[in-house]
Image (cartoon, rainbow, N blue to C red):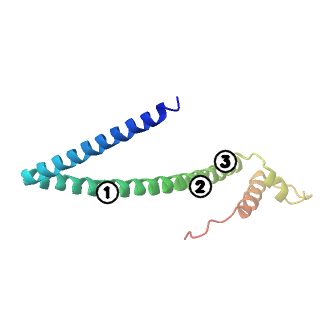
C-alpha cells in the first residue's frame, strides 16, 4: 500500500497540471472571444454595471425596509398602550355615568353627614371627586 501512495501522488499531480492547462485554455478562449467581438464585451460590461447598481439599490431597500419594520413595531406598541389607557378611561367614565361605585369613589367619598342629600347632589360630588383624581394629559390645549 505504501508503494501505491507515490503513484497516487504522481497521478494527482498530473491531473492537477492537466486541470491548470485546461483552465488557462478557457481563459484564453474568453479573451479571444471578447477581443473578436467587442460589442458583446461592452454589452457584458454594461450588464455587470447594471447588476452592481441594482444590487446596491436592493441592499439599500432592504435596510430601509428593516428600519420601517422596526418603526412600525414601535408605533404599534405605542398605539396599543394609548388604546389601553383610552379604554380604561372610557370604562371608568361609563361606570360613573351608570352610577356604579368604584374603588376610587369609595376612597374619595366624604364621611356621611347627618343631613340627607338628594341623589343628584351625591352623584355630583362623586363625579367631581373621581374626575379630579384622573391624570391630566400633557400637551393638550
Q: Is residue 93 left or right of residue 80?
A: right
| 2 left or right, relative to 91 | left
Q: Is residue 37 visible?
A: no
Q: Is residue 115 above or below residue 24?
A: below
Image coordinates for residue 19, horizontal then vertical, percent: 30, 41
Residue 28's disc is none
Q: Secondary structure at mark 1?
A: helix
- Mark 1–mark 2 CB contact (< 8 Å): no
Q: Nearer the viewer, mark 1 or mark 3?
A: 1
Which one is nearer the viewer's eye here, 12 or 34?
A: 12
Residue at screen point 69% across, 50% down: 92
- Residue 108 drawn at (x, y percent): 82, 59
Residue 97 in sight: yes
**On the picture, is 94 further left or further right than 57?**
right
* Residue labelled with disc 3: 91
Q: Tell me which residue sits at (66%, 50%) in the image.
A: 88
Residue 130 lies, in percent from the top left, at 74, 58
What label sits on residue 57 in the rendered view? Answer: 1
Of callouts 2 and 3, which one flags the residue occurring earlier in the amino acid sequence? Answer: 2
What distance separates the C-alpha of mark 1 from that of mark 3? 50 Å
Amino acid at each position: 500500500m505504501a508503494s501505491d501512495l507515490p503513484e497516487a501522488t504522481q497521478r494527482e499531480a498530473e491531473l492537477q497540471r492537466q486541470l491548470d492547462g485546461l483552465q488557462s485554455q478557457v481563459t484564453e478562449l474568453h479573451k479571444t472571444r471578447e477581443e473578436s467581438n467587442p460589442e458583446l464585451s461592452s454589452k457584458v460590461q454594461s450588464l455587470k454595471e447594471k447588476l452592481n447598481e441594482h444590487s446596491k439599490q436592493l441592499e439599500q431597500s432592504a435596510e430601509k425596509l428593516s428600519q420601517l419594520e422596526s418603526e412600525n413595531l414601535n408605533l404599534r406598541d405605542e398605539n396599543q398602550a394609548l388604546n389601553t389607557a383610552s379604554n380604561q378611561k372610557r370604562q371608568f367614565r361609563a361606570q360613573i355615568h351608570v352610577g356604579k361605585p368604584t374603588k376610587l369613589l369609595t376612597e374619595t367619598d366624604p364621611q356621611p353627614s347627618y343631613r340627607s342629600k338628594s341623589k343628584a347632589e351625591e352623584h355630583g360630588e362623586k363625579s367631581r371627586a373621581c374626575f379630579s383624581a384622573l391624570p391630566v394629559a400633557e400637551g393638550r390645549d
